[in-house]
Image: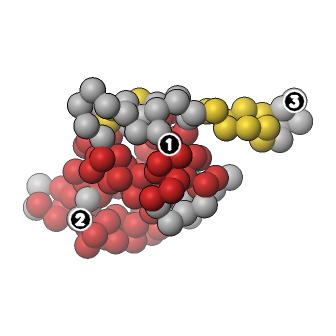
Amino acid sequence: MRLNHDCVRDCMLYIESNLEINESINPSEVVSKLDYSEKDIFYSLNQLTKMKYIDSGVKFNYDVKGTLVNISTSNITDINPIGHEFLDNVRDNSTWNKIKTYAKKSASSVSLSTLSTAAGTVTKNLLGL
C-alpha cells in the first residue's frame, strides 16, 4: 500500500485539533471526519504509530499469505514530540506545498521519515537558517 502524504498530514492536524489532555480519539472518528478512504486513514495512523509520531494501537493483521485479515484499533492518546515537530513544519498550506515539491524533486518515492526531514529542511530555508 502506498502512503498518502496528504492523508498523513490531515490525520495529524485532525488529532492535534481534537485531542484533549486525559482524553482519546477513536480512529473511526478520524475516518468519519476526513475525506480519504478508510484504508488510507488506518494505514496513515498505523505508520504514524510505528514512527512514534502518535500513541495509538492501530495495527494491521495479515494471514500467512500476506492478505489483510482485519485492522485492530485502540484509541489515539497522545502526539509525541516528534509528531509535534512534524506538525510545526507542515501546518502552513503554502509551506506544505513547497515541502511536497521539494520531496518529489529529491526522490520518486518518499518515506515518512524522509518527508519529515524534507519538511525540516524547507522550513529552515524559509526561515533563512
Total labels: the figure holds 3
Q: Residues within 10 Å of mark 2 (few under 14, many from 20)?
A: few
Identify the residue shown where x is 27% and y is 50%. 17
Identify the residue shown where x is 40% and y is 66%. 100
Can residue 117 be seen? no
Q: State the residue lying farthest toward the left.
A: 128
Residue flagged by tag 1: what amino acid is it? Pro
Residue flagged by tag 3: what amino acid is it? Val
Side of 57 where 62 appears, left or right: right
Image location of residue 24, percent across then percent down: 37, 33
Q: Which residue is mark 1?
A: 27
Q: Is residue 74 above or below residue 87?
A: above
Q: Is residue 116 above or below residue 95?
A: above
Side of 7 where 85 appears, left or right: left
Q: Tell whether label 2 touches label 3 (CB within 8 Å).
A: no
Q: Is residue 13 above or below residue 102?
A: above
Image location of residue 128, percent across then percent down: 10, 61
Viewer-nearest residue: 17 or 95: 17
Q: Is residue 6 above or below residue 52?
A: below
Residue flagged by tag 2: what amino acid is it? Asp
Q: Which residue is mark 3?
A: 64
Q: Residues within 10 Å of mark 3 (few under 14, many from 20)?
A: few
Q: Which residue is mark 2?
A: 92
